Amino acid sequence: MTKLKTQSLHKRESELANSNRQLEILSNGIFKTGELPKFKEKIAQIGQFPLKPKKLEILQINVGYMCNQVCEHCHVDAGPDRKEIMTKETMHQCLEVIKTTGAHTLDLTGGAPEMNPNFRWFVEEASKAGIKDFIVRSNLTIIRANKKYYDLPDFFKKHNVHVVSSMPHWTRGKTDKQRGEGVFDQSIKALQDLNAIGYGLPNSDLKLDLVYNPSGAFLPSDQASMEKDFKKALLEDFNIQFHDLFAITNLPISRFLDYLIASENYEDYMFELVEAYNPDAVANVMCTNTISISWDGWLYDCDFNQMLDLKVESKVKHISDYNEDLLNDRNIVISQHCYGCTAGAGSSCQGSVI
Amino acid sequence: MSKTYYDPADLKKFGNITEWSEELGTKFFDYYNSVFQEGALTAREKSLIALAVSHTEKCPYCIDAYSKDGLQRGITKEEMMEAVHVGAAIKSGAALVHGVQMMNKVNKLDG
C-alpha cells in the first residue's frame, strides 16, 4: 500500500501540477498513436461534435482550493497548502448572477468550501435568491475539524442547504486509505450529527446525499447496487441514514492521473474508459447543463475543465461579464478526460447520468 | 507467437470467440450474463463465488476479472481472501478426503 501524500502536487512542485502537462499526456501516447480514438472522434460518430450545451440547470461555484484533507485522488489537488480562495468581491459578482440565473441548482464546492472565511455570509446571501436546490459539497470531516465548525449542521439546516458528502466506502480501511487516517471515524461522527438534526432521514426535506468514487484504478459499479450496500452497512454498523448515493468515476486528471502513472495503471485505465464509452451518456453529460465558476471568477464547462484550465469557448469568459444567453451558445471544450463522464452509466457531480 | 501461454491482453479478446462460431458463442455469453444477474443470490455474492472458483480452476483471466469486479462492487480484500480460502479449503478437503479410500484399501489388504 502506498503512503498517502500530505501535500498537494502544487506544493510538491510536481510536473502534473501544470495543467498543460496533463493535457499533453492526455493527447499523446496511446491517443497519438491511434491505439485509442480521441474523444472528439467518438462523439463525432454520433453527431455530437461540437458538443453543445442544453438549458442551464446548475451553477457550480468553487469557492477555493483550500481543504483540511489531502485525498489521494482529488481532481482539484486541494489541501491545506492551497491558498486560492474566492474573495468577497468575486462572491458579490456571483450573487448578482445567482439572482438572475435560469439555473435551478446552486452547487458550492472546493476544497472544503466551509474554509473560505466568507463562506457563511455567502450562503446567507445566496439562500435569499430563492434557488430551488442549494447544494454544499462538504467533506464531512470539516464539521469535526475545529470547534468553530461544530455548528455547521445547524447552519446548513437554517438555510435549507442540501448536503452532498464524499464517502468512499462503508469500512474504515478503504476510506482512510483514500482520504487519510482518521477520516472514516470523523465522517461517521459528522453523519451522525447531521442525522441527529434531521438530515438524511426518510421523508425529511433536509437532503443528505453521499458521493462514492472508487479507491483505485477501476470504474464504479452500478449506482443502485452500491447505494443498497452503503445504506445497509451504514445503518447496521452506525445507525446512519442518507438519501441518495452518487457513484462518480475518477477522471484521469490531477492527483488521480499522478496515481495512475505512478502505479503503471494509466494505459489500462484509459482502455477501460474507452471500452466502457456509452454513446447514450453523451447527451446528458453535466457540461451540457452546468457552468463551473472558479475561485477567481473564470468560467468553465465543468469542474474538471476548471482544473485543466480549459476556460469556456465564449466571448464571455469571466463572471464579471456573465451573460447566460451568450454562454449557452458556446461549444463545450473537450479532451480525453471526458471519457470519464461517458463510461458505463455515465458520471457527473450528480452521479450516473442514465 | 507469444512466449507465454497466458497473455493478460487476451482477456479483452474473449468476445472474439463468437467470430468462429457465432451461434455457440452467443449462446455462451447470453448464458454467462444471465447467470450473473441478481437472483436468489445477489450479484455481489455471485462475484465472490466466481472469485473463489477462479482460484480453484487456476484461471488467471478469471482471477484478474473477478478481483476487479469485486473492487468495483465495494467488496473488501478481507472478503475476497475469505472467499479464496473457501475455494482452497474445498480443494484441500477434496484431496484429503481420498485418505479414507487409502485407509479402506490398507485396512482391507493388511487389516
Image (cartoon, grey):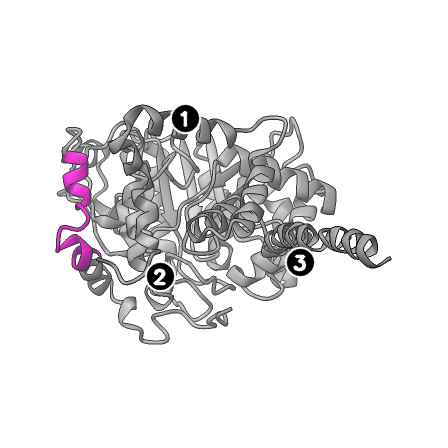
**Dot 1, how many residues are within 10 Å of its Cα: few (below 14), some (14-19), or many (20+)?**
few
Percent of width and height locating residue A225: 54, 35
Of badges 3 and 1, nearer the viewer stands 1
- Which residue, given by chain and number where applicable, does mark 3 sit on? A185
- Which residue, given by chain and number where applicable, does mark 1 sit on? B30
User: Which type of secondary structure does the marked residue at label 1 adopt?
Assistant: helix
Question: What is the chain identity of the residue bearing mark 1?
Answer: B
Q: Residue furthest bottom?
A: A12
Residue kind at label 2, given as amino acid type = Leu
User: Which type of secondary structure does the marked residue at label 2 adopt?
Assistant: helix
Q: Quadrant of residue A143?
A: bottom right
Of badges 1 and 2, nearer the viewer stands 1
Foreground residue, A159 or A232?
A232
Residue A217 vs A288, above or below: the answer is below
Q: Cβ–Cβ below 8 Å for labels 1 and 2?
A: no
Q: Cβ–Cβ below 8 Å for labels 3 and 1?
A: no
Q: Is residue B57 magenta?
A: no
- Which residue, given by chain and number where applicable, does mark 2 sit on? A260
Q: Report the span colored magenta.
A: A26-44
Foreground residue, A276 or B62?
B62
| Residue occupying the point 44% across, 41% down | A126
Percent of width and height locating residue A102: 32, 29
Percent of width and height locating residue A186: 64, 58
Percent of width and height locating residue B23: 32, 23
Of badges 3 and 2, nearer the viewer stands 2
Q: Count of labels shown?
A: 3
Quarter the C terminus of chain B occupies: bottom right
In space, the residues marked 1 and 2 are separated at their CA atoms by 33 Å
Q: Which residue lies furthest to the right in this view?
A: B111
**Dot 3, how many residues are within 10 Å of its Cα: few (below 14), some (14-19), or many (20+)?**
some
